[in-house]
C-alpha cells in the first residue's frame, strides 16, 4: 500500500474514491482563506485541493516526498513548494502567515515533533491567524470498521480528540474541534482550528 500511495495519481484517486478529499475541503472551508492571504501548508503532499483556494493567495507547501512536490509544482506553478520537513531553519526563511494547514500530518508525527510544529506555527501566524488540521482519530462509540481504520492508518500516531487538542493547547490560546464523518467509508476524523 505504501508503494502504491507514493504514486501521485494513485494517492489522489484513492483519496477521492474514499471521500477523503471531502475532509480537505471541509478543512479549507473552516480556514476561510481570503484573497490576498498568505498560507503555509505543512505536509502538503500533491496539494491537489489548491484549486479550491483564491488564485491570488501566497502559498508555501512543505513535504518530504519529492514525487508529490514535482506533481504539485507542475499543476500549480505560481505556488512555492519546499522539499523537507518544516523546522525552525525553514521557518526563519519565510514570511508570517494568515493560515497554516496541516491536512493529514499530525497523526504521522510523535508528540515531541507535533508540539514543536505547533510552537513554530503559533510563532509564524499573524494576529488573528489560524491553524487548521484534520486527522484520523479515535472516537468514543466508533464502530468496528471505523476502529479498524483508525488502528490500521499509515500514520503511527492516531490520537483521540483530547490527544490532538492537548498538542495545540500548549501553543494556542483558543482551540476548537469537531468530529467529521463525511468519508464514503465509516472513518473517524478530527478537524481542529487553533488561533493565536
Ligand atoms: C496523509 S499525507 C497528506 C498530504 C496532503 N496534505 C493531503 O491532504 O492530501 C501526509 C503528507 O505528509 C508528508 N510528511 C510526513 N512527515 C512529514 C514531515 N515531518 N514534514 C513534512 N511533510 C511530512 C508526507 O510525505 C505526506 O505527503
Image: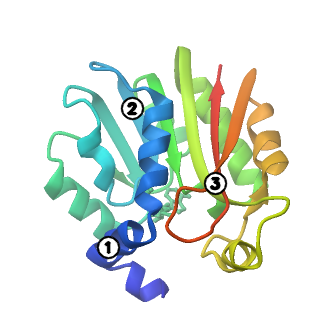
Mark 3, secondary structure of its residue: helix
Callout 1: few (<14), some (14-19), or many (20+) C-alpha neighbours within 10 Å?
A: some
Closer to us: 136 or 129:
136
**Alpha carbon of mark 2 to alpha carbon of mark 1: how far?**
25 Å
Q: Nearer the viewer, mark 2 or mark 1?
A: 1
Q: Which residue is mark 2?
A: 39
Q: Nearer the viewer, mark 1 or mark 3?
A: 1
Mark 1, secondary structure of its residue: helix
Q: Is residue 152 left or right of residue 141?
A: left
**Alpha carbon of mark 1 to alpha carbon of mark 3: how far?**
22 Å
Q: Is residue 21 left or right of residue 156?
A: left
Callout 3: few (<14), some (14-19), or many (20+) C-alpha neighbours within 10 Å?
A: many
Residue at x-position 29% and y-position 55% = 48
- The image's mark for residue 123 is none
* Screen quadrant of the C terminus: top right
- The image's mark for residue 13 is 1
Residue at x-position 76% and y-position 72% = 143
Closer to us: 130 or 63:
130
Tell which circle, 2 or 1, labels the residue nearer the N-terminal end.
1
Mark 2, secondary structure of its residue: strand
Closer to us: 139 or 161:
139
Tell which circle, 2 or 3, labels the residue nearer the N-terminal end.
2
Q: Is residue 164 left or right of residue 13?
A: right
Q: Position of residue 168 (x, y in %)?
A: 73, 37
In the rendered image, the vertical position of residue 155 relative to residue 60, given as above or below:
below
Q: Which residue is mark 3?
A: 106
Q: How is the image coloured?
A: rainbow
**Alpha carbon of mark 2 to alpha carbon of mark 3: how far?**
18 Å
Amino acid at each position: 500500500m505504501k508503494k502504491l500511495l507514493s504514486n501521485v495519481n494513485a494517492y489522489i484517486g484513492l483519496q477521492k474514491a474514499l471521500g477523503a478529499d471531502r475532509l480537505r475541503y471541509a478543512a479549507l472551508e473552516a480556514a476561510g482563506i481570503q484573497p490576498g492571504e498568505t498560507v503555509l501548508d505543512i505536509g502538503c503532499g500533491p496539494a491537489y485541493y489548491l484549486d479550491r483556494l483564491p488564485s491570488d493567495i501566497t502559498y508555501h507547501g512543505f513535504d518530504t516526498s519529492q514525487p508529490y512536490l514535482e506533481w504539485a509544482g507542475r499543476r500549480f506553478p505560481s505556488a512555492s513548494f519546499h522539499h523537507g520537513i518544516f523546522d525552525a531553519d525553514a521557518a526563519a526563511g519565510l514570511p508570517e502567515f494568515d493560515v497554516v494547514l496541516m491536512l493529514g500530518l499530525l497523526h504521522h508525527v510523535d508528540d515531541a515533533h507535533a508540539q514543536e510544529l505547533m510552537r513554530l506555527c503559533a510563532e509564524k501566524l499573524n494576529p488573528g491567524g489560524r491553524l487548521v488540521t484534520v486527522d484520523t482519530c479515535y472516537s468514543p462509540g466508533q464502530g468496528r470498521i471505523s476502529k479498524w481504520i483508525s488502528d490500521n492508518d499509515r500514520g503511527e500516531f492516531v490520537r483521540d480528540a483530547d490527544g490532538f487538542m492537548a498538542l495545540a493547547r500548549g501553543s494556542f490560546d483558543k482551540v476548537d474541534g469537531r468530529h467529521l464523518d463525511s468519508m464514503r467509508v465509516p472513518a473517524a476524523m478530527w478537524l481542529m482550528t487553533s488561533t493565536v
